[in-house]
Image (cartoon, rainbow, N blue to C red):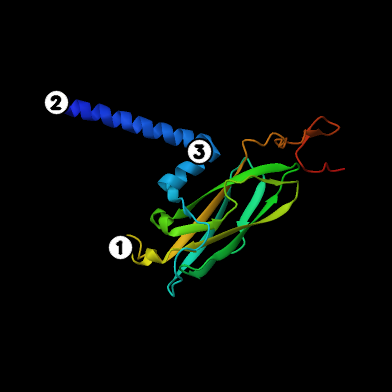
Amino acid sequence: MAKATSKNGKTAIILFSIAGGMVGLAFASVPLYKLFCQVTGYGGTTQVAEGVAVKPSRKTIAIRFDANVNPNLAWSFKPGQREITVNAGVPTKAVYLARNLGPTATTGTSAFNVTPYKAAQYFSKIDCFCFTEQRLTAGEEASMGVQFYVDPEIFDDPNTREIKTITLSYTFFRSPEDKTAKQVKAPAPVTGPSGKIITGKKLKS
């Protein structure tokens, strides 16, 4: 009995190690991460559709929009709308707004998820800017669209029929392929006649 328990323990460790390695590889590469999420539904990843394959429903559900930016990317990023109510099965368009706040052109790429996670299997994106490199010059603004629909079966599934609101969240990161972006350096300290450092304040005459 002890041998069997030991064998099962070793098997579990091996399986967890393989799974952990796959997750690590997925996060190390955006294409791999995209494929991994689409196959497994990891982290609230939505379905991908070329068009609407369900009948429209009179039932409605609220969709909230969330936006985040990694500190390494000097952009502002926000949803064009905070919340909308949609009919299940009806394709809907929404926009996100981005602006490069840095002094040089930079390239960003976004990841996304849906919460509650269990709603992701019923949230299908027809068109999206996620996992696509977006390059903005200094001060440039861009409007990025996403088109989606919610499968009416979400109301029939005992595990999801109580859901009233779904949140679609995007996070922009600086692209690993961005070779031209430079870190903004702090200005050199300015000293007065006495040699004292001026920290952004004018010296009194």
Mark 3 / mark 2, whichever is N-terminal: 2
Secondary element type, mark 1? loop
Residue name at image x 46 percent, y 50 percent: 45
Nearer-the-camera pick, 204 or 173: 173
Picture coordinates of residue 67 (x, y %)?
57, 54
How far apart marks 3 and 2 lie (CA) works out to 40 Å
In this rendering, the label closer to the viewer, 1 or 3: 3
Which kind of residue does numbered mark 2 sit on?
A: Ala
Q: Residue 2 carries which label?
A: 2
Q: Residue furthest left?
A: 1
Which kind of residue does numbered mark 3 sit on?
A: Leu
Nearer-the-camera pick, 200 or 78: 78
| Rendered view: 183 above or below 46 | above
Secondary element type, mark 2? helix
Dot 3 corresponds to which residue? 32
Dot 1 corresponds to which residue? 158
How far apart marks 2 and 1 lie (CA) works out to 41 Å
* For residue 87, side relative to residue 8 (left or right): right
How far apart marks 1 and 3 lie (CA) works out to 32 Å
Quarter location, residue 173? top right
The crowd level at tag 1 (other Cα within 10 Å; few <14, some 14-19, many 20+) is few
Quarter location, residue 182? top right
Residue name at image x 12 percent, y 27 percent: 1
Secondary element type, mark 3? helix
Which kind of residue does numbered mark 1 sit on?
A: Pro
Picture coordinates of residue 38 (x, y %)?
46, 47
Q: Residue furthest top?
A: 3
Picture coordinates of residue 156 (x, y %)?
34, 66
| Rendered view: 68 above or below 185 | below
Picture coordinates of residue 190 (x, y %)?
80, 34
The crowd level at tag 3 (other Cα within 10 Å; few <14, some 14-19, many 20+) is some
